[in-house]
Amino acid sequence: MLDNGVIDRSEPNAMRAWSKLLGVTQVQILVAVAVVGPATESVRAYLDDPARSNPFAVHTPLA
């Protein structure tokens, strides 16, 4: 379920397990998978980058 290197969005048990393992909501996982694909390493990297993983983050333009 969690060891094939791919996050299966269609499997509710897998989504709950990934959510718990990664410490994020299932919605955050779904967004990450939509942006970077289902590869677990890509999803982890996306979720670890606060600027990319939070669509509501306030970005201050550089002066």
Image (spheres, helix red, strand yellow):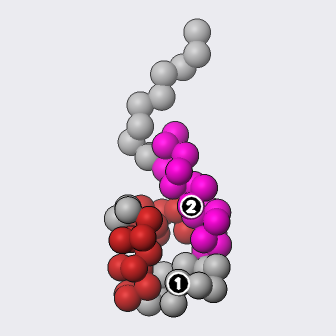
Q: Residues within 10 Å of mark 2 (few under 14, many from 20)?
A: some
The residue that label 1 is drawn on is 2
Q: Is residue 8 left or right of residue 11?
A: right
Q: Is residue 36 left or right of residue 22?
A: right
| Magenta range | 35-53
The image shows residue 50 at horizontal and vertical percentages of 49, 43
Q: Residue at x 38, y 62 (%)?
A: 23
The residue that label 2 is drawn on is 44
Helix or strand or loop: what does disc 1 sit on?
A: loop
The image shows residue 5 at horizontal and vertical percentages of 64, 79
The image shows residue 38 at horizontal and vertical percentages of 61, 74
Q: Is residue 41 left or right of residue 53?
A: right
Q: Residue at x 53, y 51 (%)?
A: 48
Q: Residue at x 56, y 61 (%)?
A: 44
The answer to whether residue 18 of the structure is visible from this angle is yes
Q: Which mark is residue 35?
A: none
- Nearest the eye: 32 or 14: 14
Distance, label 1 to label 2, CA atoms, is: 13 Å
Helix or strand or loop: what does disc 2 sit on?
A: helix
Label 1 or label 2, whichever comes before in sequence order: 1
Three-letter code, disc 2: Arg
Q: Is residue 17 left or right of residue 43?
A: left
Q: Residues within 10 Å of mark 1 (few under 14, many from 20)?
A: few
Residue 39 within the magenta-colored segment of the rendering: yes
The answer to whether residue 35 of the structure is visible from this angle is no
Which quarter of the picture shows residue 22? bottom left
Main SS of the magenta segment? helix
- Nearest the eye: 2 or 36: 2
In the depicted structure, whether residue 22 falls above or below residue 9:
above
In the depicted structure, whether residue 53 falls above or below residue 36:
above
Three-letter code, disc 1: Leu
